[in-house]
Amino acid sequence: MRMPTKQQIRYQWERGGPVITWALIIACVAVWLVEVLAGFLSPVLQNWLIVQGMAAPATMVREPWTIVTSMFLHAPNSILHILFNMIALYSVGPELERLMGHWRFLGLYMISGLGGALGLMTWGVLAPGGQGWRYAAYGASGALFGLFAALLVVYRRIGADIRSMLVWMAVNFALPFVVGGVAWQAHVGGFVVGGLLTWLLVAGVKPWRGKSLKWRMQVYGWGVTVLVIALILALNTANPYAGLL
């Protein structure tokens, strides 16, 4: 398969093609291949890469970059994790990218991933016996569930039939409890934050509904980002490991 030329990428960009969606897929697959290669070279190196990049409530505030790096890591010893997530991304990404525009779609994706981190931090506080603070996760699922929520909000807004989507989302939410070892907390956090941001964009404050989508994304996007970061910092005050690590 040949790589697309600059002219082809520009053509897709100008016509609302899924340029950012493909860029995210390529980035996630590239990182996964690095993980796999590291495993062939040294299992210790592979483990170090994952540990350094995954998001853990106990260290998230001290190592905030892990909120981003964890979104591009996937289980290196199985193709199912990366395959399922990338199929999910391609199933909803192009439609949202076309509706929102490239950069606004990327903003929604990253803010939803931040929501996934908030879900992990919330579990750190709520989990019995403090076990949530010792939890760690990686994968694009938090951001993806934000996209699921966004599409649900948009389809509901335009009156489209969402019954099949609701069934599909219910299966995805139930999957962690069947399979095990899946960070459902990040799924919930990403879903809530992505849904909230999209609801604000399509409805939100009544006097602002006439503003451009670009303006609304700037105001609501940064507003939700600041709110989520503030909540993460507030939850971290209950972190028993904050002063130890």
Image (cartoon, rainbow, N blue to C red):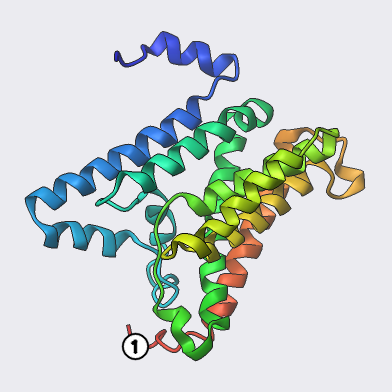
- Using a 10 Å C-alpha cutoff, classify the residue at mark 1 as few (fewer than 14 neighbours), some (14 to 19) or many (20 or more): few
- Could you say which quadrant of the image residue 202 lies in? top right
Q: Is residue 236 above or below residue 182?
A: below
Q: Residue extending furthest front?
A: 178
Residue 14 in the image: state x and y as whole percent: 57, 15
Q: Is residue 82 left or right of residue 156?
A: left
Residue for point 59% across, 14% down: 15
Q: Is residue 38 visible?
A: yes
Q: Judge from the rendering whether residue 86 lies leftward or rightward of residue 33; answer left or right.
A: right
Query: Which residue position holds label 1?
Result: 244
Q: Is residue 19 above or below residue 103?
A: above
Give residue 105's position: percent from left, percent from top: 59, 36
User: From the image, which quarter does the N terminus lie in?
Assistant: top left
Where's residue 92, x and y in %?
Answer: 59, 34
Q: Is residue 146 above or below residue 4?
A: below
Amino acid on which disc 1 is placed: Leu
Q: Nearer the viewer, residue 8 or 189?
A: 189
Q: In the current view of this chain or complex, which residue is farthest to the left?
A: 41
Name the residue located 15 percent from the left edge and 52 percent from the top edge: 39
Residue 103 percent coordinates (x, y): 57, 34
Position of the C terminus, as image quadrant, is: bottom left
Left or right: residue 57 compared with residue 108: left
Of 57 and 175, nearer the camera is 175
In the rendered view, does 38 fall on the left or right side of 214? left
Q: In the picture shown, does residue 208 fall above or below 185?
A: above
Q: Report the residue at 12% width, 62% height from top.
A: 44
